[in-house]
Image: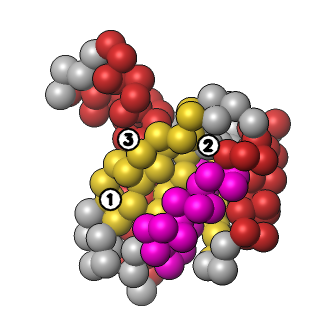
């Protein structure tokens, strides 16, 4: 099943998608949108265009597992997204996904403007990869 992951950000929202076999999570694109509702609408449109069968939204929980302001905002993003798409939308713990993505960018020596463009997509791919690992272990 094609699953799309979302790493929501105030100005840049990273998207990633896996193949039908749920083997490989790949960066998809970055949505550059400051307006919350328009960002949700754009992500919904992309999910439909890419024929996503499920959407995983990163949930930036605090390190102690509690929900802070960012987590609440991402949960609202997912709630609105559910109203616009006809597929399951779930929340997934994304703690440290951006730090992991930064580590990947350092490993491949990606710097400057290109790094900023890919970082959010890479973070979404990290979120999706974590979710896919979970699905493999619990199916």
Q: Secondary structure at mark 1?
A: strand
Residue drawn 69% across the image and 55% down it = 41
> Mark 1 and 2 residues: CB-CB less than 8 Å, in contact?
no
Q: Which of pointers 3 and 1 lies earlier in the amino acid sequence?
A: 1
Q: Which residue is mark 1?
A: 25
- Where's residue 48, x and y in %? 54, 70
- Where's residue 62, x and y in %? 69, 38
Asked whether residue 24 is in view, the answer is yes
Q: Which residues are magenta?
A: 40-58
**Is residue 45 inside the magenta stretch?**
yes
Residue drawn 47% across the image and 50% down it = 15
Q: Which residue is mark 3?
A: 122
Q: Which of pointers 2 and 3 lies earlier in the amino acid sequence?
A: 2
The coloring applied to the image is: secondary structure
Callout 3: few (<14), some (14-19), or many (20+) C-alpha neighbours within 10 Å?
A: many
On-image quarter of the N terminus: bottom left
Q: How far apart are labels 2 and 3 at the CA level? A: 12 Å
On-image quarter of the C terminus: bottom left
Q: Secondary structure at mark 3?
A: helix
Callout 1: few (<14), some (14-19), or many (20+) C-alpha neighbours within 10 Å?
A: many
Q: Which residue is mark 2?
A: 8
State whether residue 92 is above or below residue 114. below
């Amino acid at each position: 099943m094609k699953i799309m992951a979302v790493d929501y950000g105030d100005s840049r929202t990273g998207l990633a998608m896996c193949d039908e076999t749920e083997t490989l999570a790949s960066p998809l694109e970055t949505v550059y949108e400051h307006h919350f509702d328009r960002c949700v609408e754009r992500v919904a449109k992309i999910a439909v265009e890419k024929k996503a069968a499920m959407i995983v939204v990163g949930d930036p929980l605090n390190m102690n597992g509690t929900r802070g302001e960012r987590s609440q905002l991402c949960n609202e993003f997912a709630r609105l997204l559910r109203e616009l798409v006809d597929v399951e939308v779930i929340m997934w713990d994304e703690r440290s996904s951006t730090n992991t993505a930064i580590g990947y960018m350092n490993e491949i020596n990606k710097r400057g403007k290109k790094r900023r463009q890919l970082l959010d997509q890479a973070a979404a791919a990290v979120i999706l990869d974590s979710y896919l690992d979970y699905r493999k272990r619990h199916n």
